[in-house]
Image: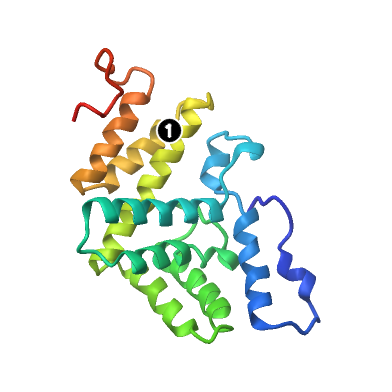
């Protein structure tokens, strides 16, 4: 598992600190843990998104898109879910598809969140939010799972615009995951930006005519 640096939590071995300090040192690992799929696709480490950056992107997208199109969704819960949904990777790491079964991946990540959230007074609430996302049974969880994949598609578009090669596989993965029309429209705009994508109408920025 490639990271910018060693886990900061190791610096606290044998030291007596407040739980919130220990949790922040644990969370710091997500700020240095590269999204491994980008590395495998050839994105240089100097430009590679970290898990924490991805989580922030998911939370921001969920906030903006829920406010704009889905007022019936609990926006505050979505933002909390977006910020917490990758905490299982603190100790499990960013496991790319195919490396483990989904059941084994879930178990490793559950052990991670139980360890981290268990240090906090409201840890049971945070664990419940994480489990809600994992189950994908509520409207908020289903929406966030699509946002989780949409963020990947948006980041793939950023990388392609910056000249980091053909990332078609990431667009295809995003395409398979999105069912919400408003989110699919965003994906269509991203596809139009790709080499060979649909041309913009003269004098009209792509997407503004719809």
Residue sitting nearer the eye, 113 or 100: 113
**Coloration of the structure image:** rainbow
Residue sitting nearer the eye, 208 or 18: 208
Q: Residue at x 44, y 68 (%)?
A: 106
Assign a secondary structure to mark 1. helix
Q: Residue at x 61, y 37 (%)?
A: 47
Q: Measuring from the top left, give residue 56's x and y in whole percent.
A: 49, 55
Q: Measuring from the top left, give residue 84's x and y in whole percent.
A: 47, 67
From the viewer's perspective, is 160 left or right of 209? Answer: right
Q: For mark 1, what is the residue?
A: 157
Q: Residue furthest bottom?
A: 121
Q: Measuring from the top left, give residue 66's x and y in whole percent.
A: 28, 56
Q: Measuring from the top left, give residue 140's x and y in whole percent.
A: 28, 65
Query: From what the image shows, is residue 210 above or below residue 59?
Result: above
Judge the density around disc 1: few (<14), some (14-19), many (≥20) Cα neighbours within 10 Å.
Answer: many
From the viewer's perspective, is 126 left or right of 209? Answer: right
Query: From what the image shows, is residue 43 above or below residue 30?
Result: above
Q: Residue at x 53, y 36 (%)?
A: 41
Of the 4 image quadrants, the one containing the C terminus is top left
Residue sitting nearer the eye, 93 or 127: 127
Q: Residue furthest top?
A: 202
Q: Residue at x 60, y 49 (%)?
A: 34
Residue sitting nearer the eye, 95 or 120: 120
Q: How many marks?
A: 1
């Amino acid at each position: 598992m490639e990271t910018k640096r060693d886990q900061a939590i190791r610096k606290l071995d044998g030291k007596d600190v407040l739980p919130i300090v220990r949790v922040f040192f644990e969370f710091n690992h997500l700020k240095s843990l590269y999204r491994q799929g980008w590395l495998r696709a050839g994105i240089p480490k100097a430009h590679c998104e970290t898990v924490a950056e991805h989580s922030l992107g998911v939370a921001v997208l969920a906030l903006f898109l829920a406010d704009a199109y889905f007022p019936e969704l609990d926006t505050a819960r979505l933002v909390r879910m977006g910020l917490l949904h990758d905490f299982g990777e603190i100790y499990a790491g960013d496991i790319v598809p195919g490396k483990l079964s989904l059941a084994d991946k879930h178990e490793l990540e559950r052990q991670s969140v139980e360890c981290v959230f268990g240090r906090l007074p409201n840890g049971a609430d945070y664990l419940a939010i994480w489990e809600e996302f994992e189950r994908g049974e509520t409207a908020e969880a289903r929406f966030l799972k699509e946002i989780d994949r949409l963020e990947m598609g948006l980041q793939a578009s950023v990388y392609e615009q910056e000249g980091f090669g053909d990332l078609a596989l990431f667009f295809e993965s995003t395409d398979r995951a999105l069912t919400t029309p408003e989110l699919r429209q965003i994906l269509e705009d991203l596809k139009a930006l790709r080499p060979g994508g649909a041309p913009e109408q003269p004098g009209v920025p792509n997407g503004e005519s719809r």
